[in-house]
Amino acid sequence: MNRSLPLNITLFALLCALALASLLAGRIWLSPAEILRGFFSAQSLASLIVVELRLPRTVLAILIGGALGLSGAVLQGLTRNPLAEPGLLGVTTGAALGAVIAIYFGLASVSSAVIPMLGLLGALAAIALTFSLGGGRGTLALVLAGAAVSALASALISLALNFAPSPYAAYEIMTWLLGSLADRSWNHVALAAPFIIVGCALLLTAGRALDTLALGEAQAGSLGVNLPRLRAVTLIGTALAVGAATSVAGAIGFIGLIAPHLVRPLVGYAPRLVLMPAALAGAVLLLAADMGTRLVHFGPEMKLGVFTSLIGTPFFLWLVVRLKRTAP
């Protein structure tokens, strides 16, 4: 039996329970009976809250968390670096830059779809630049190219903030960069879901090649692994999945770093076995974090990116200390 199957079943059951709780929880708590009435009575207040507000938010949290967890696991396997995460290749900052451009030039007023569309284009442009600079030259060159592209995109975002045409534009840019699933609708789900699903499907095909790559690049090449193709699949899958996720929710950190490490000791250290549990764990973590932003009240709703950073930073520090102790 697949060693990861029991964990996958457990995580899926936990995800279903959290999804139900996500429909219940908020500033206005609903009972299970009210949720059922909301699905079948289109004119009620419960229907507006459940179907139009909380359900698309829950679906997006599951999709985005799964995309971040899966891409983090694949990138950690590709680079053989336990600290790798989706922002490593410049995808996150590229998507953020695309959205910032839409806000800076006032394009967001044209349509609510402009920000996510430019965010997705920014992610694809960033990954194309990363691949053109570091593709075919080894994993280290790819990582360095991703770091350079990420730094460039961050500098351009800072430039946009510095020369924001109005205080409102600067505030809107900062608010978007903090990451949130509040006020997301079915339009955002329809825009992001196809790209996330296609990107995740591509990433899942890399499992067996990543198992072989764990032996080393030279050994993997001698065993028939097409390393340029593996890098291309990883880059394209990450660009589609994480780019679409960032384009609708803003920058959300640490989920892609934490999720693979939480499940890896439970399924073994073969990269292929980590992929699906990492995706489910990422969905569970992000959905729980999104519920936390609704339940922890300090005035305005806490931004999701801030919440995940507060949770993820202690884990990151613990991981660094553990690696320092176990390193030869």
Image (cartoon, rainbow, N blue to C red):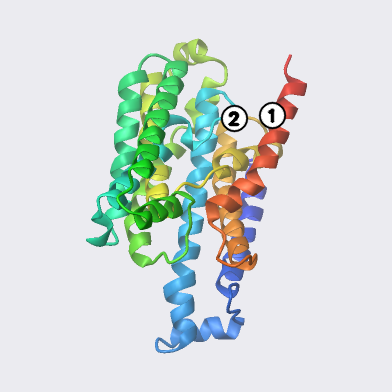
Q: Is residue 167 left or right of residue 2?
A: left
Residue that carries the numbered disc 1 in the rendered image: 320
The percent position of residue 198, horizontal first and vertical second, equals: 36, 46
Q: Residue at x 55, y 72 (%)?
A: 23
Which residue is at the front of the view, 288 or 151?
151
| Circles 2, 1 touching at the beta carbon (< 8 Å) | yes
Q: Earlier in the sequence, mark 2 or mark 1?
A: 2
Q: Is residue 252 visible?
A: yes
- Number of residue marks: 2
Residue that carries the numbered disc 2 in the rendered image: 83
Q: Is residue 127 left or right of residue 76?
A: left
The percent position of residue 286, horizontal first and vertical second, equals: 56, 54
Q: Residue at x 43, y 67 (%)?
A: 183
Quarter of the figure that contains the C terminus: top right
Which residue is at the front of the view, 15 or 328?
328
Q: Please tell me whether residue 134 is drawn above or below residue 160 in the rendered image.
A: above
The secondary structure type at the circle numbered 2 is loop
Q: What's the amino acid at mark 1?
A: Val
The percent position of residue 204, horizontal first and vertical second, equals: 46, 39
Q: Please tell me whether residue 310 is drawn above or below residue 37 in the rendered image.
A: above
Mark 1, other Cα within 10 Å: few <14 / some 14–19 / many ≥20: few
Q: Residue at x 35, y 16 (%)?
A: 136
Q: What's the amino acid at mark 2?
A: Leu
Hey, which residue is sitting farthest left in the picture? 110
Q: Is residue 239 left or right of residue 204?
A: left
The percent position of residue 292, horizontal first and vertical second, equals: 62, 61
